[in-house]
Amino acid sequence: MAHFALVIPSLEYIILDPTPRKFQTYKEIGWDDQSIKNYLSNKENHEKIASFMTNTISFSASSRRNRFYEIYNQYNMLDLEIAFKGAVEGLTKLSKHFETHIISERIKQLQEKTLEQLSNLQFPMDKIHLYFKQTHESLYSYKRDVIRKIVSKFPSGVGIITHPKDGDLFKPYEYAVLGFDTIKGETTFSGHSEFVCHSWKEIYASLEDQQ
């Protein structure tokens, strides 16, 4: 039985890579392939919704967010997601020594399809606890409450964050915090994590001493 928890308060750009799903969303809206590739390849755009104009469509109105998610959250679009590089192997190895908890930012309506896709991608689903939020639930409160429950069972553990602000969720507890710079630059994690990793290989190497 694991004595420590591994808590990851995010799903995209650390467990799943949503790039193919986003690419197809923009393509269906009417953007050209090369422009989509250029936009999605920039880390600074990972959490943004693009604004663009073509000869046939203007995707710059305030309603574009709703239009984007209307397509992006269709069930068949989740089939396009792939495992983030190194995530399957990393979680499989770490789950031998940690009880793994992933706090998804997705709503419960996407739970069944997301679990199906993770299983299809060969994630060790029998060793992972995955959480989904209610539709109108505050994201910060939801993450805070889940972490509080995890800590009540595992007073010690490790958090891996892709958002520097998520480091604050672990401050009341005796958890080591690692940054993973797939969304934000390395320097933005200063004061929010002990150090920053650039790959799952680095994450595993960093946690070897705690196994």
Image (cartoon, rainbow, N blue to C red):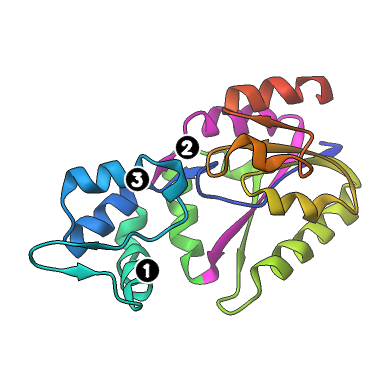
Q: Secondary structure at mark 2?
A: loop
Residue 25's x, y, as percent?
Answer: 27, 59
Q: Nearer the viewer, mark 2 or mark 1?
A: 1
Q: Work out whether mark 2 precedes mark 1 in sequence or the reverse, and give the earlier one.
A: 1
Question: 124 or 84, which is in the foreground?
Answer: 84
Residue 73's x, y, as percent?
Answer: 38, 66
Q: Work out whether mark 3 precedes mark 1 in sequence or the reverse, and give the earlier one.
A: 3
Q: Secondary structure at mark 3?
A: helix
As measured in the structure, the alpha-carbon distance from the residue carrying label 3 to the one carrying label 1 is 16 Å
Bounds of the magenta span?
80-108
Quadrant of the image occupied by residue 175: top right
As measured in the structure, the alpha-carbon distance from the residue carrying label 2 to the one carrying label 1 is 21 Å
Q: Residue at x 91, y 47 (%)?
A: 155
**Residue 84: numbered disc:** 2
Amino acid bearing label 1: Tyr
Q: Is residue 156 above or below residue 132?
A: above
Amino acid bearing label 2: Phe
Q: Residue furthest left?
A: 55
Question: 3 or 168, which is in the foreground?
Answer: 168
**Residue 69: numbered disc:** 1
